[in-house]
Image (tube, helix red, strand yellow):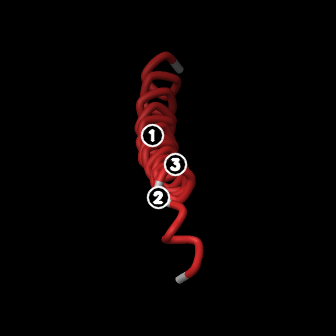
């Protein structure tokens, strides 16, 4: 019984680690997109000639 519980725990732990890694990647991608959008807004604010393009 304990062996079965340990195997189930290890399998679930691997799935949790995979989900956690995916969420970490998604966090960095979202932060990168937000940073690019913020950089764009700041650039347009400080260089008004870019608004005419």
Q: Nearer the viewer, residue 17 or 51?
A: 51
Instruction: Measure how far apart labels 1 and 3 are at the Cα level.
Output: 27 Å
In the image, is 28 to the left or to the right of 38?
Answer: left
Q: Position of residue 52 (x, y in %)?
A: 58, 79
Instruction: Measure how far apart labels 2 and 3 are at the Cα level.
Output: 8 Å
Residue found at the very far front of the displayed protein: 49
Seen in the picture, residue 12 relative to 42 is either above or below; the reply is above
Residue 47 image label:
2
Q: Nearer the viewer, residue 33 or 12?
A: 33
Dot 3, how many residues are within 10 Å of its Cα: few (below 14), some (14-19), or many (20+)? few
Q: Position of residue 24 (x, y in %)?
A: 45, 40
| Closer mark to the observer between disc 1 and disc 2 | 2
Say whether marks 1 and 2 touch (CB < 8 Å): no
Q: Position of residue 12 (x, y in %)?
A: 51, 36
Instruction: Measure how far apart labels 1 and 2 are at the Cα level.
Output: 34 Å
Residue on which the image places disc 3: 42
Tell me the SS state at disc 1. helix
Dot 2, how many residues are within 10 Å of its Cα: few (below 14), some (14-19), or many (20+)? few
Q: Earlier in the sequence, mark 2 or mark 3?
A: 3
| Closer mark to the observer between disc 1 and disc 3 | 3
Say whether marks 1 and 3 touch (CB < 8 Å): no
Please give the name of the residue rendered at 43% of the width and 31% of the height, measured from the top-left corner: 7
Please give the name of the residue rendered at 53% of the width and 59% of the height, measured from the top-left corner: 44
Please give the name of the residue rendered at 49% of the width and 27% of the height, measured from the top-left corner: 9
Residue on which the image places disc 1: 24
Say whether marks 2 and 3 touch (CB < 8 Å): no
Please give the name of the residue rendered at 54% of the width and 62% of the height, measured from the top-left corner: 48
* Residue 13 quadrant: top left
| Closer mark to the observer between disc 2 and disc 3 | 2
């Amino acid at each position: 019984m304990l062996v079965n519980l340990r195997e189930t725990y290890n399998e679930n732990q691997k799935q949790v680690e995979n989900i956690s890694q995916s969420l970490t990647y998604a966090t960095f991608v979202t932060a990168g997109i937000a940073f690019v959008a913020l950089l764009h807004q700041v650039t347009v604010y400080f260089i008004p000639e870019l608004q005419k393009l």
